[in-house]
Image (cartoon, rainbow, N blue to C red):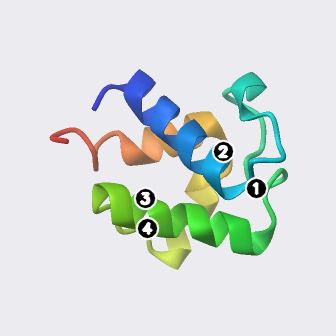
Amino acid sequence: MTREEIGQAIIKIVSEVNPDEDWTALTPEESLRGKLESMDFLDVIMELRKQYGVEVPEKDYGQLATLKSSIDYLEPKLADK
């Protein structure tokens, strides 16, 4: 997957988890965790595993703080997808 595809996948997942928020205007440096409740954030982690087979250990949750950092973290894991 390309960086753009990963970004689109993340936005799609967070939009499904929290449809009340306008995720289309999310900037790369804006906090995802600030816009998601704890359970919603965990739902995003579960969807990444379910849809893409990506395991995100709890110690790495901080690396998914923003859209950009999430893409940076997921890019090597999704390179062959």
| Residues packed near mark 3 inside 10 Å, few (<14), some (14 to 19) or many (20 plus) | some
Quadrant in the picture for residue 53 = bottom left
Q: Where does the image place residue 32, in percent across and percent down from the top left?
A: 73, 48
Mark 4 → mark 2, Cα distance in angstroms: 19 Å
> What residue do we see at 39% from left, 28% from top?
5
* Residue for badge 1: 33
Mark 3 → mark 4, Cα distance in angstroms: 8 Å
Q: Which badge, 3 or 4, comes first in the chain's sequence?
A: 3
Q: Where does the image place residue 19, in percent across and percent down from the top left?
A: 75, 48
The answer to whether the residue labelled 3 contacts the one labelled 1, judged by CB atoms less than 8 Å apart, is: no
Mark 1 → mark 2, Cα distance in angstroms: 13 Å
| Residues packed near mark 2 inside 10 Å, few (<14), some (14 to 19) or many (20 plus) | some
Q: Amino acid at mark 3?
A: Leu
Task: Say which mark, if any, is on residue 15.
Answer: 2
Q: Where does the image place residue 57, in percent across and percent down from the top left?
A: 45, 74
Dividing the image into 4 quarters, which one contains the C terminus?
top left
Q: Nearer the viewer, residue 59 or 75?
A: 75
> What residue do we see at 57% from left, 61% from top?
44
* Residue for badge 4: 56
Q: Which badge, 2 or 3, comes first in the chain's sequence?
A: 2
Secondary structure under tag 1 reads loop
The answer to whether the residue labelled 1 contacts the one labelled 4, judged by CB atoms less than 8 Å apart, is: no
Q: Amino acid at mark 1?
A: Arg
> What residue do we see at 84% from left, 53% from top?
34
Q: Amino acid at mark 2?
A: Ser
* Residue for badge 3: 48
Secondary structure under tag 4 reads loop
Q: Which badge, 3 or 1, comes first in the chain's sequence?
A: 1
Secondary structure under tag 2 reads helix
